[in-house]
């Protein structure tokens, strides 16, 4: 679904089509017709190679053979990996071993049963180490499509934090984030729906949660001087697993309110359903991260990432499009403190599902409750000058307001376009690309900037460490050893 909503949309744009030809596409054999149809609708006519299901962090021999054979017949420059994160390492390893640049959907990787098995949890960090080592060895670009790094509002927050750090030397002392995407699922649907599912023993951290682990990484990095950044994180977490969620929000509860709209009854609660969810992953995640340097706590990060929050779903049968049309609404609230000098609040609260036209139900698109509401409140100590309180709307940061949802599709498409531009320059064919001067200047600026501006794999180590630590902490606390101490992970900036 993410590929359909993101990359095929991007490929329909002239600026991306001038850069990219999809030479071949790999997917399950059962998805052949769908994959080819999506590509053709986006103006592409790729070859298809069928792959099999696998769980190991390496490609099956048959798939590797097919890829190698096709690579010889139809050479390519780069690989886009848009699949379940448990398979990311295997595909990326093959691409790097064949000297190909790589764009990977977030998260970098995940592991089956990460919420229950400490070894699998910490294996997520091992995956990063292996891919980083191989990409360095092969001198290839590995970029992560963590598109919130490129969003004008989140980018602005980082720049504001960095300005105070550079001028006054203060670092981030605390960062608190709450995020909810309102996925109301009936208990039986936890078993039946694969999209953003939980059956592999992981969940929200491997879904949208990675974005907010990554924002914590970026805002802390930009808002803290290098010599004061933490070298270790001590992490404690608590999860609401799918089995627990099925007891919190029951089919019986749902039936009462759905009946008010004449909706059919959902499948009734069943003890067998509850039992079957025993090894499923986390619906909600709550984490506390101590940031340590030289045996001193230099800051705290608190993260709440939930699927179970406020939703606009009002129907029994799930919508066909689970990405945007099943009642999901976005709620975010972030508060970053740079000691006594500076604080930034970011908030985004939708009351309705995203709509690309305004007004929607009387709610202006950019204001509280609207589909693209997002504002930044900046608080300044008078010692550093500027307004004591400044409010910035995301609308103020955009040069144009297309009919598409700026906050999501446009940013994702630009990330894909940026990666393609970089690949073209590395291949020495940038003189054959029809780019606007403004875009060419933007690409050069990004190439000459710090690695985190490009979302390079090397800059995701703290994000991956946070993710591995949160999984590891819960698995350790609830495992057979029943220990409660924090998981400690090293950080590399």
Image (cartoon, rainbow, N blue to C red):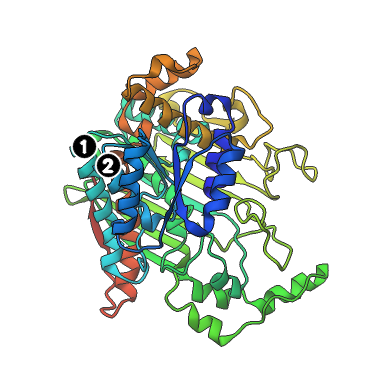
Q: Quick one: which residue is furthest to the bottom in this view?
A: 271
Asked if 262 appears above or below 330 in the picture, the reply is below
**Which residue is label 2 attached to?**
96
Asked if 167 appears above or below 410 in the picture, the reply is above
Mark 2 lies on a secondary structure that is helix
Residue at position x 46%, y 34% from top? 416
Residue at position x 42%, y 29% from top? 420
Tell me which corner region of the image, top left, top right, bottom left or bottom right, holds residue 171: top left
**Which residue is label 1 attached to?**
138
Percent position of residue 340, x then y: 39, 38
- Asked if the residues shown at circle 2 and circle 1 are in contact, with their CB atoms under 8 angstroms apart, the answer is yes
In the displayed structure image, the side of residue 148 where residue 13 appears, left or right: right
Sequence order check: which comes first, mark 2 or mark 1?
Answer: 2
Tell me which corner region of the image, top left, top right, bottom left or bottom right, holds residue 168: top left
Most foreground residue, 319 or 94: 94
Query: Which quadrant would the C terminus be assigned to in this image?
Result: top left
Most foreground residue, 9 or 396: 9
Percent position of residue 120, x then y: 29, 65
Asked if 70 appears above or below 111 in the picture, the reply is above
**Is disc 2 surrounded by few (<14), some (14 to 19) or many (20+) residues within 10 Å?**
many
Residue at position x 59%, y 74% from top? 187
Whole-Å distance between the Cαs marked 2 and 1? Answer: 7 Å
Most foreground residue, 17 or 197: 17
């Amino acid at each position: 679904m993410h590929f359909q909503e993101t990359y095929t949309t991007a490929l329909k744009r002239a600026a991306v089509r001038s850069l990219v030809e999809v030479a071949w596409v790999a997917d399950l054999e059962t998805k052949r017709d769908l994959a080819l149809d999506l590509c053709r609708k986006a103006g592409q006519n790729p070859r298809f190679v069928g792959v099999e299901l696998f769980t190991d962090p390496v490609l099956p021999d048959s798939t590797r053979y097919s890829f190698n054979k096709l690579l010889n017949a139809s050479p390519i420059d780069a690989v886009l990996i848009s699949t379940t994160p448990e398979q990311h390492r295997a595909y990326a390893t093959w691409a790097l071993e064949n000297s190909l640049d790589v764009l990977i959907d977030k998260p970098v990787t995940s592991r089956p049963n990460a919420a229950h098995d400490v070894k699998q949890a910490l294996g997520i960090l091992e995956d990063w180490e292996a891919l980083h080592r191989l990409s360095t060895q092969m001198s290839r670009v590995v970029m992560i499509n963590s598109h919130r790094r490129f969003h004008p509002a989140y980018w602005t927050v980082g720049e504001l934090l960095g300005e105070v750090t550079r001028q006054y030397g203060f670092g981030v002392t605390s960062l608190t984030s709450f995020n909810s995407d309102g996925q109301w699922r009936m208990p039986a649907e936890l078993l039946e729906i694969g999209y953003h599912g939980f059956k592999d023993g992981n969940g929200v951290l491997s879904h949208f949660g990675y974005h907010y682990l990554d924002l914590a990484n970026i805002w802390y990095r930009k808002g803290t001087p290098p010599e004061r950044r933490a070298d270790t994180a001590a992490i404690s977490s608590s999860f609401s697993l799918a089995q627990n969620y099925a007891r919190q929000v029951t089919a019986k509860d749902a039936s009462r309110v759905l009946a008010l709209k004449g909706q059919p009854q959902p499948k009734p609660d069943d003890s067998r359903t509850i039992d079957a969810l025993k090894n499923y992953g986390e619906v909600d995640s709550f984490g506390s991260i101590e940031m340590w340097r030289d045996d001193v706590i230099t800051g705290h990060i608190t993260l709440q990432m939930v699927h179970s929050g406020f939703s606009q779903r009002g129907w029994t049968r799930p919508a066909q499009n689970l990405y945007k049309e099943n009642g999901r609404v976005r709620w975010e609230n972030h508060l970053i403190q740079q000691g006594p000098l500076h604080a930034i609040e970011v908030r985004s609260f939708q009351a309705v599902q995203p709509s690309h036209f305004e007004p929607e139900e009387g709610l202006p698109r950019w204001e509280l409750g609207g589909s693209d509401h997002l504002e930044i409140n900046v608080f300044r100590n008078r010692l550093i000058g500027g307004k004591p309180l400044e409010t910035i709307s995301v609308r103020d940061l955009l040069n144009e307001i297309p009919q598409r949802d700026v906050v999501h599709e446009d940013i994702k498409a630009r990330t894909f376009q940026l990666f393609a531009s970089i690949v073209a320059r590395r291949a020495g064919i940038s003189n054959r690309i029809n780019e606007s001067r403004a875009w060419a200047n933007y690409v050069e600026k990004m190439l000459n900037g710090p690695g985190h501006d490009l979302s390079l794999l090397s800059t995701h180590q703290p994000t991956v460490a946070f993710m591995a630590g949160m999984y590891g902490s819960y698995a350790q606390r609830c495992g057979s050893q029943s220990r409660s101490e924090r998981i400690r992970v090293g950080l590399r900036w």
